[in-house]
């Protein structure tokens, strides 16, 4: 929706008020527009209800903040923010959860169930699972000490999941080069800055050895570790992830402040202490290195940009209006 720019300073206040009313009417009629006031009358307490359950979950386990943030990202990058990542496999449909980027990796589904139960108790059949993920991501980041942003709402839920191959091509791999990762972000309307900023989500959470072990012993078939890893850090990673060891063993993505949402992710990168190849590449690719360095020196700028980029993530191809449905159980489509 776009309006003509104000052409003259002679435009009266009354005219501006009129245009404002028209803008509001357009917003209501325009099924494509998410809005921060979407549940203002139908479920005014939804944000507080979501935050309350997220707070309990994060108090019980700090990592859950990271897991909930990642769920929203993996939902939105595949077919848009439509709650499809939450659908369990059925006898006929595989679903997204067992795609290689997600299997034994995505978590927090039980917390989403708890949020959904709490929301249904106050506003039955009203709030989509896709919106719950968007609200939970914001609550999680805020509770971990990070920024809060204005969560836009009004998404509806998909009635079928994406395929495994769609997940695998949309979700970036930690071993891809930065050029390719930037192209995957561009495919959903996100630019280079968004790529650098959103990678900063790795200031919280954990990764399995399998996600970075290719860097530790025989990097790109060289017979040696990735030379970009800080040597002291390399030794700690090698002892945590020995060759032939448990591929599901976990390491913190941010070695210095693992559960705090701050800009330490970027200062670690300056010290060559990025865990994933895709993290450390931010400082070696000339498109991303200057911004990664800037965020290492300016947490405020990172926080501000992170909120803006998360709103963009939340705007990726939502289902709105009469599309999709409001799922009653986030794991299954409604019975027809
Ligand atoms: C830039 C491209 C990205 C790549 C290649 C990537 C890759 C990964 C990988 C491999 C893991 C560990 C998975 C495992 O070992 O089980 C991970 C974890 C995580 N990712 Fe990303 N990611 C990217 C972008 C993002 C974005 C945009 C966000 C959110 C805005 C995000 C949030 C997270 C979080 C919070 C975790 C930790 C989850 C937990 O501890 O449960 N990542 N990511
Ligand atoms: C997902 O992980 C489980 C448990 O490790 C494994 O049995 C299954 O084969 C995996 N599924 C796929 C599709 O890789
Ligand atoms: C980056 O990765 C893509 C996809 O794997 C590949 O086609 C391309 O050649 C790579 N570019 C560089 C510079 O390695
Ligand atoms: C490293 O990987 C390359 C290519 O996969 C392989 O040919 C080589 O034997 C490996 N080297 C070692 C020391 O494992």
Image (cartoon, helix red, strand yellow):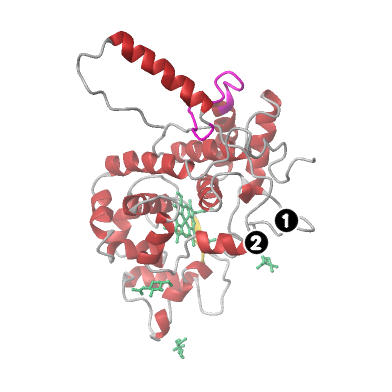
Q: Within the image, what quadrant is residue 123 found in? A: top right
Question: Where 44 sits versus 34, above or below?
Answer: above
Ligand 2: does it lie within 8 Å of the C-beta at label 1?
A: no
Pick whichever, 19 or 332, lies toward us: 19
Pick whichever, 93 or 139, lies toward us: 93
Question: Where 157 sits versus 18, above or below?
Answer: below
The reply to whether the C-beta atoms of the residues labelled 2 and 1 are less than 8 Å apart is yes
Q: Is residue 139 left or right of residue 321?
A: left
Splitting the image into four quadrants, where does ligand 3 fall?
bottom left
Residue in view at x 42 percent, y 15 percent: 21
Q: How many marks?
A: 2
- Specify whether residue 334 is in view: yes
The label on residue 128 is none
Pick whichever, 162 or 222, lies toward us: 162
Q: Main secondary structure of the magenta part?
A: loop
Mark 2 / mark 1, whichever is N-terminal: 1
Label 2 SS = loop
Q: Is residue 214 left or right of residue 116?
A: left
**Residue stretch rendered in magenta on the structure:** 31-46
Residue under label 2: 98
Ligand 2: does it lie within 8 Å of the C-beta at label 2?
A: yes
Q: CA distance from mark 2 to mark 1?
A: 9 Å
Was residue 1 drawn as part of the magenta stretch in this picture? no
Residue in view at x 51 percent, y 30 percent: 30
Local crowd size for mark 2, using a 10 Å CA cut-off: few (<14), some (14–19), many (≥20): some
Local crowd size for mark 1, using a 10 Å CA cut-off: few (<14), some (14–19), many (≥20): some
Residue under label 1: 89
Q: What is the residue that sits farthest to the top in this orientation? A: 14
Q: Where residue 329 appears, x then y in whole percent?
A: 72, 40
């Amino acid at each position: 929706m776009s309006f003509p720019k104000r052409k003259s300073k002679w435009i009266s206040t009354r005219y501006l008020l009129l245009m404002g009313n028209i803008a509001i009417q357009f917003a209501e009629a325009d099924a494509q527009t998410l809005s921060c006031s979407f549940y203002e009358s139908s479920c005014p307490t939804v944000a507080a209800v979501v935050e309350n359950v997220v707070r309990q979950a994060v108090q019980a386990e700090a990592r859950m903040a990271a897991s909930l943030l990642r769920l929203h990202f993996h939902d939105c990058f595949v077919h848009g923010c439509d709650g499809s990542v939450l659908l369990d496999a059925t006898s006929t449909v595989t679903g997204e959860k067992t795609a290689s980027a997600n299997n034994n990796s995505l978590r927090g589904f039980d917390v989403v169930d708890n949020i959904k139960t709490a929301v249904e108790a106050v506003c039955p059949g009203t709030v989509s699972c896709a919106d719950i993920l968007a609200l939970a991501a914001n609550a999680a980041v805020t509770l971990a000490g990070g920024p809060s942003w204005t969560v836009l709402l009004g998404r509806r839920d998909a009635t079928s999941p994406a395929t495994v191959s769609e997940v695998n091509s949309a979700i970036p791999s930690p071993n891809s080069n930065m050029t390719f990762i930037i192209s995957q972000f561009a495919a959903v309307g996100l630019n280079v800055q968004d790529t650098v900023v959103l990678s900063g989500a790795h200031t919280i959470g954990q990764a399995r050895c399998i996600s970075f072990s290719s860097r530790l012993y025989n990097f790109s078939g060289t017979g040696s570790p990735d030379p970009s890893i800080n040597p002291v850090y390399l030794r700690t990673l090698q002892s945590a992830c020995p060759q032939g060891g448990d591929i599901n063993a976990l390491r913190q993505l941010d070695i210095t402040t693992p559960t705090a949402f701050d800009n330490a992710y970027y200062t670690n990168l300056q010290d060559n202490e990025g865990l994933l190849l895709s993290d450390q590449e931010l400082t070696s690719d000339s498109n991303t290195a200057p911004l990664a360095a800037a965020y290492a020196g300016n947490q405020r700028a990172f926080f501000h940009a992170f909120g803006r980029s998360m709103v963009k993530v939340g705007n990726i191809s939502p289902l709105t209006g009469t599309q999709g449905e409001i799922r009653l159980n986030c794991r299954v489509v409604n019975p027809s």
